[in-house]
Amino acid sequence: MADSSDQAFGRREFVQGAASAALLASASGTVIAAASGKNSDKALVLAKIPSMHAENLRRLQEWIALPSIAAENLNYPAGAEHMAELARQAGFTGVRLVPTSGKPGVYGKLDAGARTTLAVYFMYDVKQFVPSEWTSPPLAAALVQKEGLGTVCMGRGAVNQKGPQNSFLGALAAFKAAGKKLPVNLVLVSEGEEEIASPHFGEIVADPEVFAQLKGCAGVMLPSADQERDGSLEVTMGAKGVVELELVSSGEKWGRGPRKDVHSSLEAQVDSPSWHLIQALNTLVDKDGHTPVVEGFFEHAKPLSPAQLQMVESYAATVPEKVVKESLGVDKWVHDLSWRDSLVRLYSQPTINIEGLVGGYTGPGGKTVLPHRAVAKIDMRLVPDMTAADTLAKLKAHLAKHGFGDIEVNMSGGYDPTQTDPDSAFMKAILATYRKLGSNPQVLPRSPGSWPGYRFTNAPLSLPAGGFGLGHGTGAHAPDEYYLIDSTNPKVQGLDGAVGSFVECLYALA
């Protein structure tokens, strides 16, 4: 059930009044501690966080209420302008919208006069949603009770990525409230098309002013909520790349089948573009319905190194298989693989996935038509050293070779994999911060998901990049997405603990 605002405020008042000096102390470690000398500024900043809880929550709820959805062309440029205003309020200067061939980016700089400069990657867009699938309206950002966790803020974008990003902004607000300078300079780079695979993010990074500032950065942080329900967390040293596209079969392009929907009785004498598409899809994977067989698909797929394989085996030995299966709602892994072998595939293998199939009539009851057009929405996940351009070219060549050259291949977005050295000073500082705060993270070769980090980690910038952030949330791209606000689990940080973790990390990165 949704929490009433009075109840929620009552709990916050109690926390602020009774525990302002030790709010972030928990079983995961004491974040606020008595400090002296060079740590005194940090203690003063951390001490401001409890009194800013309501403000930080309000900022998140207002942000969730304004969804920017690139696939639907919703709230542009309003979403970018809101992101720019959030940046200004946080202390960034020179904030401006960065024009692209698609949706605008947002850039700003915060010069604290420090020796080290850090880049921060934000996305202000969110995934689509179907309100009827949610137990709470997806734009209401309601406070909801979750058993075993506490109070969460439920809404589209709550954890992906507005919740963690808002907590980072809360950390900057705490510095301002304490009257203290940040220990690092910051460069903000934000985009509004991440959820359609960042088709124009390269234009933002290549902007002369943005690129010049990025060149001087020590690394790029992606604000995250890395804790699971039990307090454990993972740190990934990269992410798979992705190609998102549509395969379109139509009577018009094929030269067979109808050029408009016709009566289904004519299937006896007229070819079906829908079956044509299905036959094309069947050529993309082996008979197991899983393994890609596009010619040359694995040509540049680099296997896991011994060190990366050890990361996966350590994870397999530590994380219970049963818990993961229950969370995913699955009973078996592909090919009936063992837990360890399924994880090796997860982190090492490229994939071809059908996101959706659309064709003809899909409403209530039946409608006896032979559709003239059918569409498959596809994503391909890539591992180093694959590239989006090469993989797309191989898919097109494969279709043509197998007699499906008429099928339209419309790439909507995509980018290459990203990889960061775990021994870089940037990643060492992130890992050290987690350990200081009482968490022993599982280190993994890469995320099975994707973000356009290769724009930073590849030449010509060649910067280390990775996620950071205590806190918890789940439901990205799904109904009932949420971000934890007030935690009842001492092992998992709520909003204030997440804000505090970013303060700690900024000092560590300095």
Image: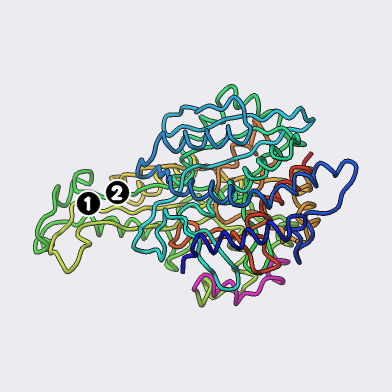
Q: Is residue 264 left or right of residue 148?
A: left
**270 in magenta:** no
Q: Is residue 309 above or below residue 432?
A: below
Q: Residues within 10 Å of mark 1 (few under 14, many from 20)?
A: many
Identify whether 458 is placed above or below 163.
above
- Please provide the residue range marked out in magenta: 313-329
What is the x, y in percent for residue 490?
A: 70, 68
Residue beneath disc 2? 248
324 part of magenta stretch: yes
Cβ atoms under marks 1 and 2 closer than 8 Å: yes
In front here: 297 or 251? Answer: 251
Rendered location of residue 230, percent (x, y) = 66, 69
Magenta: main secondary structure equals helix
Q: Residues within 10 Å of mark 2 (few under 14, many from 20)?
A: many
Residue at 53% over, 52% down: 160
Residue at the outermost right position: 37
In the displayed structure image, the side of residue 366 where residue 86 appears, left or right: right
- The answer to whether residue 167 is left or right of residue 158 is right
Please name the amino acid that badge 1 sits on. Answer: Arg
**Looking at the image, which is closer to me, 99 or 394?**
99
Q: Secondary structure at mark 2?
A: strand
Which residue is painted at 79% across and 30% down in the image? 115
Residue drawn at x 63%, y 37% is: 456
Residue that label 1 marks: 373
Number of numbered labels in the structure image: 2
Q: Secondary structure at mark 1?
A: strand
Identify the residue at image location x=62%, y=66%.
343
Residue 480 spot, x, y in % from top left: 46, 62
Q: Which of the 4 image quadrants contains residue 320? A: bottom right
